[in-house]
Image (spheres, rainbow, N blue to C red):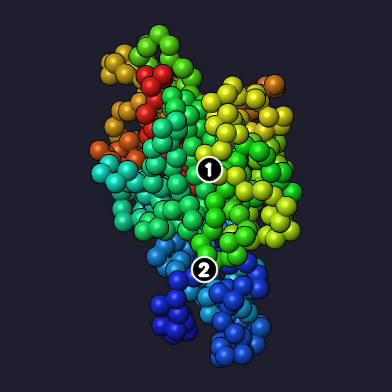
Amino acid sequence: MAIKCIARLRSRRVVQDQPEGSDQATVGDGSCPWANLPQELMREVLLRIEDSGSSWPQRRNVVVCAGVCRSWRLIIKQIVQIPQLSGKLTFPISVKQPGPKDHLLKCFIKRNRSTQTYYLYLGLTNALTDEGKFLLAARKCTRPTCTDYIISLRAEDMSKGSSAYVGKLRSNFLGTKFTIFDGQPPHPGVKMTKSRSSRLPNLKQVSPRVPFCNYPVAHILYELNMLGSRGPRRMQCDMDTIPASSIRPGGAAPTQTEFSLSNMDLFSSIPIFSSKSASMENFLSGPLSGQKDGALVLRNKSPRWHEQLQCWCLNFHGRVTVASVKNFQLVASPENGPAGPEHEKIILQFGKVGKDLFTMDYRYPISAFQAFAICLSSFDTKIACE
């Protein structure tokens, strides 16, 4: 009964992650009768709501409770575990946090060819296709020398100036090198680089004097196919912000806890560069700087040739049904050392199940955002790879 009352109270409110102290993050505690409940009772009620909503759409009750008032929101943030531990995606920030450690999180991507847009959904059942829970959207923007995929939290608003902007994927002219940019620092203390682009945020969101910068967090390289031989693509992903030790016992991956809208101390002395700056173009078109010391490297798992089917095959455990050059599985590469059991685990797999429908399954240490961006690189035309 309490859940239904809360749902009615907050049914028309759209709950978004906001920084602590933001006016939009709370409803004044004094004006909210639910905030006057005893702390012990309030926590017990919210614990039961958390336990009852193990999956979507029931999970929506947890999000609704976080929007009731500041007191409820603080308790919910203490109760709800990150996807790495719970295996659940609850709040929008969950798409920027590493996936579960013990299993692949099943998602799927829908492609709209006419609008050049892509939509990521969380699978709600074990079926290859269902209604799904919307997570992210991306729009392809073709430019003379590169291609951008703008990634957003909202399907109806995919612009770099939007408050829903999450990051982007950018390719070089040949479609062989890609860079994943995060719209906010991936972890505290990250250093700005000259190879970045910036954008002006929505005027309603923060002061227009504060630039929103794109932080390069990963690089994707597709091996050139100069001889034009037939076969699967070969790809490598350098996850610059994830240490190679994260996949070992006791290792940890950077985890964002909230969307930061502004940071005056960080941005006050940083000049604004346009998205078409010369430094960015040189960064994408020039040679790779090489393996980052201690960074996690992902490589596609080598398929085997099936004589009867006369095609290259990988075991997707029923999650892929259509043969395609876009299909791949990524595992951790044992750089400068022997391979262990952790290098056998599939971290990301992507494959075709329909004309414009693809499955995307990912796990720790990458996030849904990073996995989505890597999969978007597979959609892009590759002149020199095929």
Identified at 41% across, 19% down, the residue is 384
Mark number displayed over residue 200: none
Can residue 128 be seen in this snapshot?
Answer: no
Q: How far apart are the alpha carbons under marks 1 and 2?
A: 22 Å
Report the quarter where the C terminus lies.
top left
Give the residue type that dot 2 points to. Answer: Lys
Residue 60 picture location, percent across and down: 44, 68
Determine the residue positioned at 69% across, 43% down: 192
Rendered view: 381 above or below 166: above
Q: Residues within 10 Å of mark 1 (few under 14, many from 20)?
A: some
Question: Can residue 380 be seen in the rendering of this structure?
Answer: yes
Q: For this rendering, which residue is in front, 167 or 15?
A: 167
Name the residue tied to disc 2.
204
Q: Which callout, 1 or 2, points at the residue further toward the start of the chain?
A: 2
Question: Residue at 59% of width from left, 76% of height from top?
Answer: 23
Tag 1, which secondary structure?
loop
Residue assigned mark 1: 275
Judge from the rendering whether residue 107 lies leftward or rightward of residue 237; answer left or right: left
Does 189 appear above or below 23?
Answer: above
328 or 178, which is in the foreground? 178
Q: Position of residue 232 (x, y in %)?
A: 40, 20
Q: Quadrant of the N terminus?
A: bottom left
Residue 95 left/right relative to 41: left
Mark 1: which amino acid? Ser
Residue at 43% over, 14% down: 225
